[in-house]
Image (cartoon, rainbow, N blue to C red):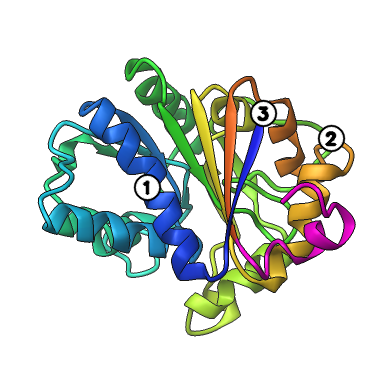
Amino acid sequence: MIKIIASKTAEEAGIAAAEVIADIVKAKPNAVLGLATGSSPIGMYKELIARYEKGELSFKNVKTVNLDEYVGLSADHDQSYAYFMSTNLFDYIDIDKSNTNLPNGLAKDPAAEAARYDGVIASMGGVDIQVLGIGNNGHIGFNEPSDHFTYGTNLVDLTDSTIDANSRFFASRDLVPTQALTMGIGQIMAADKILLIALGKGKAEILEKSLFGPVTPNVPASVLRFFKGEVIVCADDEALSVIREKHPDAV
């Protein structure tokens, strides 16, 4: 089942997404959270930090697994996703950093690292909620458009459109890594619940295609329509504009 929570602004969508996470952590203090990076979840992380600072929320017993990491970047590189998570969330809450997990972007054997990360995820007994953004080409995690859906953690070659989209975070496009380790579609779909955050006009067409078009690995996010549980979509007015135009009863 897909539930769309419509917000006027990106800030309001971040607050709505934080409310979903907060409810899970309050109900299960040792929850396993699947986390995402990029611009989409930043507002959610800011709100979660604010709730922690107010004493409304504790992450003391929470465990986390992140979707992905760039190949070739160390954890202390300012564009690595390990660094992103520390500076946007982990450094500001009471989480035990030994309970936070990301793929190792410097692993000499990416296949062995993928297998190790699969084991980490399996050892946690399941992810309570997996947070996702959505790429301009429909990728979730770094699972790019393909002729098949992936299952476990895998090494991916990033598409030109993904490299272009992420180049805004780097000094030049040439510095953007061309590969990443990412949780597979099968692992994402194994979570108990999924939270998809979509913000801005640039995500409007792909969000509509993912939620209402054919289910195909050419649009990886479309697989969410087969999810066994609840998919909660937190989106702002701009990201929902095409859905409102084509499917006015959906929102």
Cα–Cα span, label 2 and label 3: 15 Å
Q: Quadrant of residue 215?
A: top right
Q: Which residue is mark 1?
A: 19
Q: Quadrant of residue 184?
A: top right
Q: Which residue is mark 2?
A: 215
Query: Relative to 170, is 79 above or below?
Result: above
Residue 151 visible somewhere in the drawing? yes
In the rendered image, residue 134, in percent from the top left (x then y), is placed at 63, 54
> Which one is nearer the viewer's eye here, 191 or 239?
239
Label 1: few (<14), some or many (≥20) within 10 Å?
A: some
Compare marks 3 and 1 and give the one earlier in the sequence.
3
In the rendered image, residue 2, in percent from the top left (x then y), is placed at 66, 35
In the rendered image, residue 126, in percent from the top left (x then y), is placed at 41, 19
Query: Relative to 66, is 90 above or below?
Result: below
Q: Which residue is mark 3?
A: 1
> Which one is nearer the viewer's eye here, 240 or 143?
240
Query: Relative to 76, is 129 above or below?
Result: above
Give the foreground label among 2 and 3. 3
Contact flag, marks 3 and 1 (Cβ < 8 Å) = no
Residue 103 visible somewhere in the drawing? no
Q: Secondary structure at mark 1?
A: helix
Q: Residue at x 77, y 57 (%)?
A: 206
The amino acid on which the numbered mark 2 sits, given as a three-letter code, is Val
Q: Which residues are magenta?
A: 236-251
Report whether 69 appears left or right of 45.
Answer: right
Label 3: few (<14), some or many (≥20) within 10 Å?
A: few
